[in-house]
Image: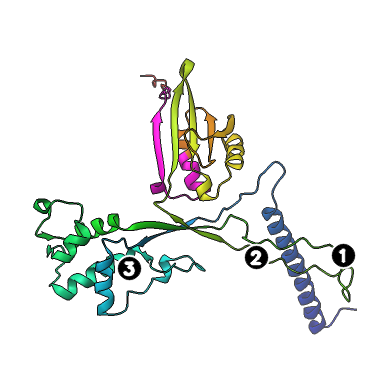
Amino acid sequence: VRPAPAAAAAAKAEASEDEDESGSDEDDDEDDDEDAPRPGQRRTIVIPSLRITELFRPSNATLPLFEAVAEQGPMPPVNPASLPEGVVLPMGTYTKEQVLLVLKRYCQAHYTVTPGAPVPVDPLLQRCLYCNEKKTRIPAEATLRDMSERLIDALQPFYVLVNPNAPPASAAPATSTAPAEGEAAGAPAAAAAPMTTVSRIYAGRVVPVQVQTVKRQARKNITTVTGLEVWGIDPAVFASDVQRSFGCSATVCDAPGDKQGHKEVQAAGHLCHELTRFLLERFHIPKKYMQTEDKGTKKKETLKPRAPQ
């Protein structure tokens, strides 16, 4: 007995739906297999980048300039994009953008400012920007760019470092794994609180990371790295990462001439430029905050065989 046409079409549609469901399940399984690390393969760890904001506080010499601008109206607001989330500026500190706006607002209130054109240096600007210069060396006019550089150098520097890799300031106390009252034994545990960033305000300029390669006896080189603690990097952890990544020996010792207890990482080999790139790519330290010095023996270039003529 042959089935009716309608019944045959319905059976065919059900069979195609079953095949699609099984195919989608297989695709999901394949995606899960692709995400899972294969035997002997390491999963890539993405480290969040550090954020640095330079702050400035008026000194006794530059304070009259800020007071004169404050009398004209409220101070320029802080750009939210230039300050890390959750960081509050201390009283009397300004970002670099605010400092430049203060100088520009003062000059626009007293003179006609044209981009690139010099502005007269009045007695107030002379006291604030050229207090250490002799009167014969004080120019009658100067551009906003030159005066802004002098103003930045005359202020007291600070900086805020936000390290997403650091642990929270107050860690939650350890709790037992036993279920609470009224909670089933097989119920899933509550989600842990997210990691919070740790921010500190340091006095002075940003301390750069120094990477230096020096020559030792028997034409051997050693590369030293100092200044990691300020950036929230553990020297011992960094030394172990260098050992695994470059296959060389790395030790941690006291930094010479340092009285604050900072450590120095010593890696065997000519790794000056390699470690600089390693700090930039893995720990996201800006290149302008790294000082690289190469005093070691240059690597020998391997000569390629000539092609037959």
Q: Position of residue 27 (x, y in %)?
A: 70, 61
Position above or below: 150 against 103: above
Q: Does residue 227 appear to the left or right of 122 in the view shown?
A: right
Name the residue located 51 percent from the left edge and 59 percent from the top edge: 200
Q: Nearer the viewer, residue 84 or 18?
A: 84
Q: Earlier in the sequence, mark 3 or mark 2?
A: 3
- Residue under numbered circle 3: 98
State which region is magenta: 276-302
* Image quadrant in which the C terminus is located: top left
Q: Is label 2 in a helix, a strand or a loop?
A: loop
Of the residues shown, which amino acid type is indicated by label 3? Gln
Q: In which quarter of the image is residue 267?
A: top right
Q: Where is residue 279 in the image (x, y as percent from the top left)?
A: 49, 44
Distance of label 2 from label 1 (alpha carbons): 22 Å
Of the residues shown, which amino acid type is indicated by label 2? Pro
Q: Does residue 263 appear to the left or right of 58 in the view shown?
A: right
Image disc number at residue 146: none
User: Magenta stretch: residue 278 in it?
Assistant: yes
Q: Is label 3 in a helix, a strand or a loop?
A: helix
Q: Position of residue 148 (x, y in %)?
A: 24, 60
- Residue under numbered circle 2: 194
Characterize the local packing of mark 1: few (<14), some (14-19) or many (20 or more) Cα atoms within 10 angstroms.
few
Characterize the local packing of mark 3: few (<14), some (14-19) or many (20 or more) Cα atoms within 10 angstroms.
some
User: Magenta stretch: residue 290 in it?
Assistant: yes
- Residue under numbered circle 1: 178
Q: Nearer the viewer, residue 140 or 51?
A: 140
Distance of label 1 from label 3 (alpha carbons): 54 Å
Is residue 247 among the parts visible in the rendering? no
Q: In which quarter of the image is residue 116?
A: bottom left
Label 3 vs label 2, nearer the camera: 3
